[in-house]
Image (spheres, helix red, strand yellow):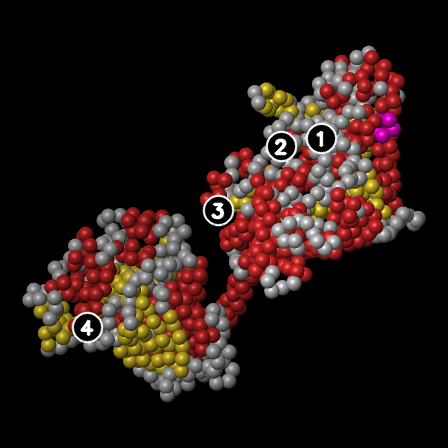
Amino acid sequence: MRDEDQRPDPDALLAMVRREEEGKRRGQLRIFLGMAPGVGKTYAMLEAARAKMAEGLDLLAGIVETHGREETEALLYEMPALPRKRIDYKGHLLEEFDLDEALARRPALILVDELAHTNVPGSRHPKRWQDVEELLENGLNVWSTLNVQHLESLNDIVAQITGVRVRETVPDAVLERAESVILVDLPPEDLRQRLNEGKVYLPRQAEWAGENFFRSGNLSALRELALRSTANRVNTEVLVYRQGHSIQTTWPTAERILVCVGPSPTSATLVRAAKRLADGLHAPWHALYIQHQPGGGQTSRALANLNLARELGAQTHVLAGGDVARLIVGFARQHNVTRIVVGKPLHRRFTDLLRGSPVDQLVRLSEEIDVHVIKGQDTGTPRTAKPGALPKPRWKDYAAAVSVVGLSTAACFAMFPYFELANLIMVYLVGVMAVAFWLPRRASALASGLSVLAFDFCFVPPRFSFAVTDVAYLVTFLVMFLVALVISGMASRIKAQADSAGQLERQASELSGLSRHLAANRGTASLVQVARNHIAAVFGCKAFVLLPGASGKLETAFMPSDEELISSKDHGVAQWVFDNEKPAGLSTQTLADSDILFLPLPGTDEVLGVIGLKPLDEDARDSLLLPDRRRLLDAFVHQAAMALDVDRLEEKAKATLMEAEREKLRSALLSTVTHDFKTPLAAISGSAESLMALGESASPEVRRALEENIAAEASRLERLADNLLRIAALESGAVVPELKPVPLEEVIGSSLARLESILAGHPVRVDVPPDMPPIPMDEVLMEQVFLNLLENAAKYTPPGTAIAILADTHRGEAVIEVRDTGPGLPPGDHDRLFERYQRGDRRGGGRGDGRDAEGYGLGLAICKAVIRAHGGSITARDNAPSGARFTMTLPLHHQS
Amino acid sequence: MTSISATILVVDDEAAILRFLKPFLQAEGYSVLEARTGREALAMASSHEPEVILLDLGLPDMDGEEIIQALPPWSRARVIVVSARGREQDKVSALDLGASDYLTKPFSLAELAARIRALLRRGATADAPPPASYRFGDLSIDIEAHVVRLGDEEVHLTPTEFKMLAFLARHAGKVVTHGQLLKEVWGKHSQGQEHYVRIHVHKLRQKIEHDPARPRHLHTETGVGYRFKE
């Protein structure tokens, strides 16, 4: 629907681009349009197809009805044809167009005859034009045939002209969206000639009414319709072209049409009339239904009419309230409507005499808006229920009204001795107001009348008789009655508005409840749970969610308990919804025999899954048809989909971030390793080269110093390589610590032995209680921990500094400390010392001789990784009075 | 040098290793053979009957266990396996399959020389009956009398501890795996109970070492087993 036709605007251009883009993906539709059966549409289509075939185009005759005509059949000769699908329907084997096979074969062009055909029940779509839509959406080019009387908006006109109502209709949008329409024309006389020769096949259906239909006058009228439809299309094409090519000219001001529909069958006529009007004016149009009371047969008939309007391209709305005319005008103003289409009431009602009919009011209120009043054509259905009919009170309501009047009377009896009569009237009016507020209008009207009668009978002298002594009381009665009526009218209007406002408020709070819950949850499982619980509660349905698996196909229900709800057929519907990104099932146009409504969950770049709703009862099923409920449902589904989408994107972002973090660590490791390796390597190669260069000239002392340097740096490289291998193995998960109970002094002993030369200058005290139990550990990894801690202690303290290793048990854990009395840890966060690949910044007040930062980061990082893998902890702090203190805890018992 | 021209087969695929090992070992007075692959090593082991094989566990064509098992049955060669740190399990398997000792790469040449000497010495006394008593510093062990003394004081050992100490003393200088000790003291069917060994070694150390965390005799070979040093 174009919103503005008057000038080329960016939106329109964008829409055109989109249309063109869509056109690229979408298949192209060509319709061979004729005025009546027998003009030779199928023949024309096949002839054109043969020409394409001769050009070598890959075409397929999807379904072609030859009706046994020889010349038509001859055209099918050697044309690849799709075998028909056989469908078992109530014991009969019926043949139908095989949509799935057609989609599977993917020909460049497919011929699908008779666009208006109604499919055998149980097919995917009720109508063949829907099959064609699906073909187009899947990028297949389609040629089809159509008679003009099957066009939805012309349905009434054709019925008027020919006296035959055609039940198989095609939405006008299908024709409007066809890339090309070819008019197959034949002068009426020639057609009649062919008919007489028996060359025209008449379908079985009685709807053709034989000869009558083919009267010359009818045919001429139909021919005109066909020509006009085609001409109309040309107009539209010109318009689209103009917008695209910025041709300046004056355009008519924008029109907007509003059609008011009710439950009456005549409303369908109104809808079609509005459609024709809108088409003629190239105007967008709306259809509105004013609802008095939810539920009931009235509503569902009105909704059927609304649905028709939607199919014809209208935006549909439902409002609730009592004052029909005011609501309509309010809506019209809000939507900039220029013309309102309403039906002429078939019967006048009593209340119309008082206030005028809703149509009269509408005309009065509408001011600058044109009101088109159209006489509804009665199509034979005896129902004459009118739009604007009030809900019928039940007998209970009347009984309640009577008892309220009784109560008022009782109260008046109590008051009678003390109050004047005028005061008693007030009591009755309060009663009437209460009835008006809680009960339907008719009940309150009854209460008004009864109140006057009761007042007269019980209190007006002579008492206990309807006779009146003072004639002035007659005026009192009249005023009392009128006041009661007005009050009841106002009260019920207030109530209706309050109800409507309450409903809006309830919807808003339901929606905000959902978003609040969604916001409070994370993860697909809990989001799905929240969404389905809310939707189930608000819409009176069982709700479930289907999400795609790794294969891209929908998997079984997300909640296992939901699986029994969904038959394999329903699952097929769900898959269709997922693939086509459109709703299907209950109360839709696609696969409508399912008792579940399936809606896609739209994500930003793809459909996330499908949500299914299975109404628990009739009311819930009907409410799914209500446009405002549907909009609320759409809002719910969108909320849920958005939450799922955000969650999904967050997960993705998190994964990306983690990957980036890993990447950062890797590069930090690389730079550490590069530095740490290069330093000893440079020392070794430098010393070696010096030795070679000096040769015999080197003094024994110099020689010795160089040789020792080589040996020392080599052993430093060795430890570095060890550390690196350990951390790589731990990180990759290749090494899982193998915990065995090992006496602590074993690892301490072997570490001390390996570091003998490095620790030579440091007195080392080991204080492990003799009864210290063995500790579950991986001795090779733990040895590394002691090697790193001891080496650090030796390296960062001046020679001669004492080192102590202390151990004890505390609350089921072994506590082990490595202490020194050196200059202590660098200032700052001591925990950062253990950060991976972090080279401690040792500028200013660092421990050690400040020669170089080598070793700390990697060594302590490994200590932490190993201790953690053992389920323990390691911390660093300053030792009193000086030095550093590394404390480890290790669990004494295996933790599973 | 103490040894009289024993033959040593060095098996390593790294030319850089061979380049320094060969002159070093020759300077130590051994005749040196070289092999780059497992196959070559096995061929030389049967044709030249070396006394010692220095076997790298990272050969391209065969793994160490295969080579040790494929040595000719008549060969009296003692195998020292060499491998990187972190491959303790490989060393244990090799030792359990009959290798005499192991070295972790990179190793000190002095250590290598000491190991070879120890092996050759043990080889010379292998056929002699085990001695009835040992003396290691102030620790003396009288096998027949079941008496252990530290200095002048008698050390009271349980039968298990004594059995362990006797076994370790008999293999002094050589690495003994947890599995070997377990099998010797507790019998064949005690596999997987290595923690017995650790606990008893712990107790033994408390009795025969002055500072159990810095043992003089009973050293831990981390991840592999123990070595009794004189």
Tell me the tag on residue A124: 2
Q: Residues within 10 Å of mark 2 (few under 14, many from 20)?
A: many
Q: Residue at x 32, y 49 (%)?
A: B66
Q: Quadrant of residue A352?
A: top right
Magenta: main secondary structure: helix
- Kind of residue at badge 4: Gln
Task: Tell if the residue under mark 4 belongs to the same chain as the one under mark 2.
Answer: no
Q: Residues within 10 Å of mark 3 (few under 14, many from 20)?
A: few
Q: Residues within 10 Å of mark 4 (few under 14, many from 20)?
A: some
Instruction: Estimate the spatial distance between the alpha carbons at disc 2 and disc 1, rounded to whole Å.
Output: 30 Å
- Kind of residue at badge 3: Met
- Kind of residue at badge 2: Arg
Look at the numbered disc 2 and give the secondary structure of its residue.
loop
Read off the chain for label 1.
Answer: A
Residue A626, horizontal then vertical, whole percent: 65, 45
Mark 3 or mark 1: which comes first in sequence?
1
User: Image quadrant for the N terminus of chain A?
Assistant: top right
Q: Which residue is mark 3?
A: A559
| Above or below, A31 relative to B207 | above
Tag 4 and tag 3, C-beta contact below 8 Å = no
Of labels 3 and 1, the one closer to you: 1
Task: Tell if the residue under mark 4 belongs to the same chain as the one under mark 3.
Answer: no
Instruction: Estimate the spatial distance between the alpha carbons at disc 4 and disc 3, rounded to whole Å.
Output: 63 Å
Q: Which residue is mark 1?
A: A381
Query: Taking the image as drawn, is residue A490 in sight?
Result: no
Look at the numbered disc 3 and give the secondary structure of its residue.
loop
Q: Quadrant of residue B179?
A: bottom left
Residue A311, horizontal then vertical, whole percent: 72, 39
Look at the numbered disc 1 and give the secondary structure of its residue.
loop
Q: Which residue is mark 4?
A: B206
| Above or below, A435 relative to A212 | below
